[in-house]
Image (cartoon, rainbow, N blue to C red):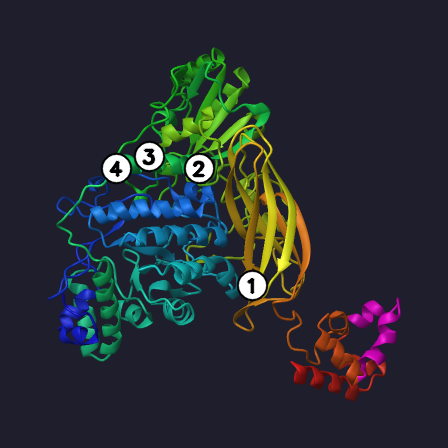
Amino acid sequence: MVKIDLDFVEGLTLEERASLVSGKDFWFTAKVPGVDRMMMSDGPSGLRKQDIDVAPADINSSVDAVCFPSSALTASSFDDQMLFKLGHHLGVAANAEKLGVLLGPGVNIKRSPLAGRNFEYFSEDPLLTGRMATAYVKGVQEEGVGVSVKHFAANNREDQRFTSSSNIDERTLREIYLAQFERIVKEAHPATLMCSYNRLNGTLNSQNQRLLTDILRNEWGFEGLVMSDWGAVADHVAALKAGLDLEMPGKGQASVDEVVTAVKEGRLQESTLNRSVLRVLKMVEKWGKDVNKKEPYDKEEQHEFARQMADDSIVLLKNDHHQLPLKTSESLAIIGELAAKPRFEGGGSSHVNAHHVVTPLDAAPASANYAAGYSLTTSTSDENLTKDALQLAKQSDRVIFFAGFPEQMETEGFDKKTISLPRNQNELLAQVVKVNPNVTVVLQNGSVVEMPWADQVPAIVETYLAGETVGEATWDILTGKVNPSGKLSESFPLRLQDNPTYGTFDRDHDEEDYREGIFVGYRYYDLYEMPVRFPFGHGLSYTSFDYSDLRVNEERNEVKVEFTITNSGNVAGKEVAQVYVANRVSRVVMPVKELRDFVKVTLQPGESTAVTLSLPRRAFSYYNVAKQQWEADNGAYEIMVGSSSRDIRLTANFDLTIGVSPLGEITADSYIGDIWNDQDPQVQSALKDSGLYEVLKPMMDDEQWVAISANMPLRSVAATGIDEKVRDKFIRLVRDIK
């Protein structure tokens, strides 16, 4: 083994170094004397390793692999340990296939329900996204396989994704679109990050020095490699200067030539090239494998884990009159072609050559009969299919109606135009409900669905894209073999028009303006007190859970939140308790509440457990743009604990003291009311020692004038007859004390 260091890099020819910063043959790094090539592969939900001897870029030639549930579903588990195990299984498979780096997970925020790649992303919330992805990354990398966290950053639409600019204010960028990347980098230390196609505030991300170097490396301390998304590099030399290390997949000799020429002409310093070359070689040294030595692994065991993961993630959205679980004695009508031809995985880079797909029809009970009802290849109703479905519904005790988006409606590469189901599905469902009201709708979809029929059906089950065990897992939930415990990782609005991006998303060919700012998902719906179909964090169970005994205690560097959960029902179950924080003190616009922690607990009937969670200072912080730092302001906060963002069971008010004064620096522009009500003992001492307290007290005690007086800055007190020397002494004392 050669020693990989700067001396080794400098010993390579210029052409060899140029080849190393350009991908080779679509999936490999280049080979140079002493260092073999390394293979990488798509596979956020299962390996999409290509058969390079057949067609390196052909999805259909990928290796046989277990297809796990998509991130849209796994995030609904709200279970870090489950995501770690998913990472472990993916790492085992990648190791067996001799892959160095697995391209995933995707962690962009679900800003609009129309975004074509939402199925590949976790959530509308950066905390949940960050927690899920951090566990995933740790699981993969502990198996000796690197990851490439993608897509960095603000890749929230697919149309014109190579050129459109995501225009985002700094606070929103930090709090919503970068926060999850920051957590992953600092806690999981991913091998690589993949920069996205789009521009950010006008600068192409592949050559965005502020993003790739200033923030990622200098602020967050990232020490890994930055690679491009496939085809994202417009100017390779500019990209290398900005902090991109590896262009994928490379343009062959053309990529080598452009780098060599730039160095020879003085447009690219050798030291800059060498820096990226060293990062590529360090990646290969740490994560590379002998690609010619495949090993077997237990795919049946992975299949069973995929089923367990789907079981723990599927969301029971509605269950009126205990429609579920189904009774084995009842006759069942299975209606919908998705039962026989399920949508169980995403398209594009998420597509897996699934090892063993079990359809819902395959796994159905013996008492069930099937009618297709509609065709997935059209949105037009078929009279004969409709007739057969209605006849079956009439003669059955209960109907299980499978509905969802066909793959051609949502995949990588383009955005959706609607979140409505195909017309033939909605029309058929409306007719089925009329002949048999005992309908359970089972959804298969990559993202949010409008449900105009929701009030007409007693039960709705959300399976998203459940992986190759879609049939087994669906019936596990429907029959009660498994008690559902999934929670929605995104809000379901009543209609598309309710979403904050409606009317602006995808409307400008070149610019995508994030006008809603920090108010994404539940933050927006809460702010406007808007009704939703199903709120963020929502998910029902076949049992019930009681919450009690909330206690909040501030410690030296954190706030402890303690409470008790009791299974008050008759069956064992799992509950996701969610902790939200409401900021009542900061002098900037804040969400009504924000998810700041969660925990999933398993309880037997009648069993109780005490939960203790620790909220760090960051849980109370917002990004102060003026100071370019995270700031937790001292003062009034509310802790909310609940079963969803709109099912809050416990609340407690408390005053934070481990932060900073929300007033910031006191100047002549500071307002009298803010200073008068500031509980900081140093401020109050300066008020009295300067004499300002005595001259302000009559103004603040006068009921007729107190509001006007409070809304006056210190620089204007002379207009009320107060000596400016007293004011200046107060400001000087405060500054000296601080």
Q: Name the residue under label 4.
A: 299
Tell me how far mark 3 sits from mark 2, CA to CA. Answer: 13 Å
User: Which structural element holds mark 3?
Assistant: helix
- Figure quadrant of residue 681: bottom right
Q: Is mark 4 in CB contact (under 8 Å) with mark 3?
A: no
Q: Earlier in the sequence, mark 4 or mark 3?
A: 4
**Numbered badge on residue 304:** 3
Mark 2 lies on residue: 312
Looking at the rendered structure, the kind of residue marked 4 is Lys
Spot occupied by residue 110 in the image (x, y as percentages of width and height): 46, 49
Task: Tell me the amino acid under the disc marked 3.
Answer: Glu
Residue 617's tag is 1
Q: Which residue is drawn at 82% across and 87% down?
A: 723
Q: How far apart are marks 1 and 2 (CA)?
A: 31 Å
Q: How crowded is mark 3: few (under 14 residues within 10 Å), some or many (20 or more)?
A: some
> Can the viewer see residue 111?
yes
- Circle nearer the N terminus (1, 4): 4
* Quadrant of the frame with the N terminus: bottom left
Instruction: Give the class, few, some or many, for how many residues have Cα within 10 Å of label 2's Cα (few <14, many ≥20).
Output: many
**Image: magenta residue range:** 691-710
Tell which of 191 and 552 is nearer to you: 552
Label pair 1/4, CB-CB below 8 angstroms: no
